[in-house]
Image (cartoon, rainbow, N blue to C red):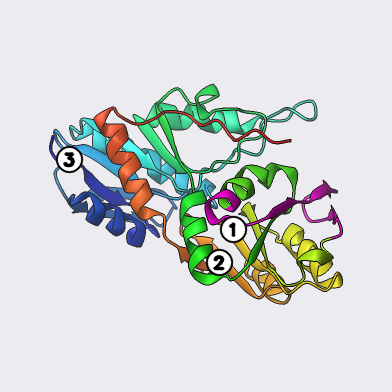
Amino acid sequence: MSKPLVVALPGNEALADAVAHRLAAPLGTLEMRSFPDGETYLRFEEETGGMDVILVCSMDRPDPKFLPLVFAAHTARDLGASRVVLIAPYLCYMRQDKRFHAGEAVTSVSFARLASAAFDGLVTVDPHLHRYRELSEIYSVPAVVVHSAAPIAGWIARNEQKPLLIGPDIESEQWVSEVAGLVDAPYRVLRKERFGDRKVKIAMPDLREFREHTPVLIDDIVSSGRTMIEAAQKLQAQGLRAPTCIAVHALLTAEAYRSLKDVAAKIVSTNTVLHESNGIEISDHLAVAAADLLAGRAKIGFRPAASN
């Protein structure tokens, strides 16, 4: 089987280069610019005829990215690509998985339909699955999920002494429990009540027995940072050390990042989303998953670990 052509959308060049290197595959170049009226010009500089094409584009801040991404997928196919696969380390529009109020868009379903129509397969990292059990419930193309637990556990083992792993809410237990098992460390899961997008209330148990441990807060998506900030403050109020905060997907604004740094000893994230906190490499896992998908040997779907 010939090697796929790996092509980065703007801002994803480092990740695409790492994926291509891991696959010993050619790295393509996509010329892309905007006309004065805001429309997109796009051109592949390499031949795509008869090749599998892997487009690499993390889908944080997705709205301005998605239309050029679809244009790239359609163009590759028009130029004769055999298959077009998307590596989207962060997969957007997963939160709105229910119509909470009359007239709301269930954007997770809408986005999945659009992406399924544009691509022959998808590789992502730990999507925010809540009411869905598997991506196949809304995606009609093969979707392979890369798990971040092993890379995170490896980083903790190399960098932290006597860690206490903490999940800030019940949804984080699937990551925290798995990582804790890999590093043979104790873990606890907090309880969170959310009041809108930026206000949360954390229920903190008595953790004073762990004062000699290093608290390590782990969550999948960190955007406003309010959950981790409140958890960090409550840990320190009990006499524990300032925590290490780990995000699978760092969607932090500059302001949120500054606020979190005020209460955290360290902040580190996987490189699913380009951010200055990136310190946990995930590209090798993405490359292997994409190769397995194209070879038809990938395990499709995702079933989160059971929680208590």
Q: Residue 171: percent from the left, percent from the top?
A: 69, 42
**Label 2 environment density (alpha carbons within 10 Å; few <14, some 14–19, many ≥20):** many
**Label 3 environment density (alpha carbons within 10 Å; few <14, some 14–19, many ≥20):** many
Q: Nearer the viewer, residue 281 or 211?
A: 211
Question: Does residue 267 show up magenta in the picture?
Answer: no
Q: What's the amino acid at mark 2?
A: Val
118 up-or-down from 247: above or below: above
Element under disc 1:
strand
What span is colored magenta in the figure?
180-206
Q: Which mark is residue 48?
A: 3
**Label 1 environment density (alpha carbons within 10 Å; few <14, some 14–19, many ≥20):** many
- Determine which quarter of the picture holds residue 81: top left
- Asked whether the residues under the numbered discs 1 and 2 touch, taking CB atoms below 8 Å apart as contact, a structural biologist would say yes
Rendered residue at 33%/37% (across/down): 85
Quarter of the figure that contains the N terminus: top left
Write down the residue under mark 2: 268
